[in-house]
């Protein structure tokens, strides 16, 4: 049995179009998170009311188009091996490149930034999971007791850890200079090596340099293990102890949704962003 849910931002959902996407068929599962775009109008958001800014948010959103393209490509190609999954990620990135070529005349890393998404996909072949991720979407596995056994790498977490400790971390996201710096210098830039560590992050923007930030692997699962493919809005919840146990009981998924809503209302900045997952028992 497969359980899916895709939930809007708990406070801004009425102002933002949905930008997550998910699809599955047979033994192939895909989730993508369209990367939030700048709203139209002013590029300097310092001191501005967030809800007023979002009245000019692009709708439909090119971020959702990118997320849909990834999921559509995964399902169309329906890869059955790890090598085929790697090639399908490349094909999805190329499809997003064509999308951007049609719609973005000159990239400015602000209002005219690339349409892009982060993404994760899984193929289940018997007791083996073949997985692929880019950015902060991910795949995690829990045993039947709710203990986390496996989680995929997150290049965005590595980048955040670096940027928050660097001089650039003093700049505010509300300032256009910070957004340009991050999107131009740290996104899909394999040359950002500090102390022998790659501190950049990946996203499917259509740029060839996204490929070094695509991570792949295989993982053995046991009968009864819970596999979850998720967008980053669910990351913090999935790393608590209680929710996996709720999620594993697929006969009562409402328990999980009620718990999610409780957390989102209590701490919207941590748990209330747009979030999507697909889960199934191995």
Image (cartoon, grey):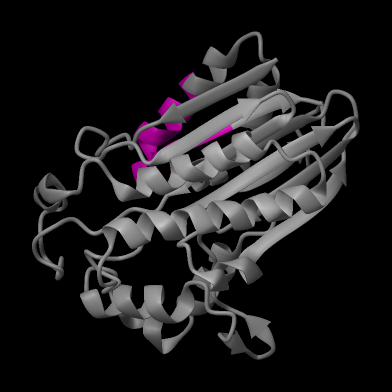
Q: Say if residue 237 shows up in the picture.
A: no
Splitting the image into 4 quarters, where does residue 175 fall? bottom left
Main secondary structure along the magenta-highlighted residues? helix
Residue extending farthest to the bottom is: 195
Q: Say if residue 24 shows up in the picture.
A: yes
Q: Nearer the viewer, residue 96 or 2?
A: 96
Q: Residue at x 79, y 39 (%)?
A: 80
Rendered location of residue 89, percent (x, y): 63, 53
11 up-or-down from 195: above or below: above
Rendered location of residue 161, percent (x, y): 54, 72
Rendered location of residue 215, percent (x, y): 70, 60
Q: Is residue 264 magenta?
A: yes
Q: Residue at x 54, y 39 (%)?
A: 71
| Quadrant in which the N terminus appears | top right
Rendered location of residue 194, percent (x, y): 60, 89
The part of the chain drawn in magenta is 258-277
Q: Nearer the viewer, residue 121 or 278?
A: 121
18 up-or-down from 103: above or below: above
Q: Indicate left or right for 116 with 61 as reference.
A: right
């Amino acid at each position: 049995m497969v359980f899916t849910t895709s939930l809007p931002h708990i406070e801004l959902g009425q102002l933002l179009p949905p930008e997550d996407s998910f699809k599955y068929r047979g033994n192939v599962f895909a989730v993508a998170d369209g990367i939030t775009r700048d709203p139209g109008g002013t590029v300097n958001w310092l001191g501005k009311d967030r809800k007023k800014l979002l009245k000019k948010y692009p709708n439909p959103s090119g971020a959702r188009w990118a997320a849909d393209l990834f999921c559509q490509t995964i399902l169309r190609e329906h890869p059955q091996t790890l090598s085929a999954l790697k090639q399908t990620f490349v094909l999805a990135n190329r499809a997003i490149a064509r999308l951007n070529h049609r719609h973005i005349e000159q990239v400015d890393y602000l209002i005219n930034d690339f349409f892009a998404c982060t993404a994760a996909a899984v193929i289940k072949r018997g007791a083996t999971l073949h997985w692929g991720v880019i950015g902060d979407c991910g795949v995690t596995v829990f045993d039947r007791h709710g203990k986390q056994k496996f989680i995929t790498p997150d290049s965005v977490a590595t980048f955040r850890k670096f940027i928050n400790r660097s001089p650039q971390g003093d700049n505010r996201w509300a300032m256009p200079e910070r957004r340009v710096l991050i999107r131009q210098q740290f996104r899909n830039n394999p040359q950002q090596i500090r102390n022998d560590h790659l501190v950049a992050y990946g996203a499917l923007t259509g740029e060839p340099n996204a490929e070094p930030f695509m991570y792949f692997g295989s993982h053995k699962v046991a009968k009864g293990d819970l596999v979850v493919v998720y967008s980053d809005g669910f990351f913090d919840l999935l790393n608590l102890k209680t929710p996996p146990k709720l999620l594993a009981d697929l006969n009562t998924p409402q328990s999980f949704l009620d718990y999610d809503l409780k957390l989102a209302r209590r701490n919207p900045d941590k748990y209330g962003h747009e979030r999507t997952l697909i889960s199934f028992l191995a």
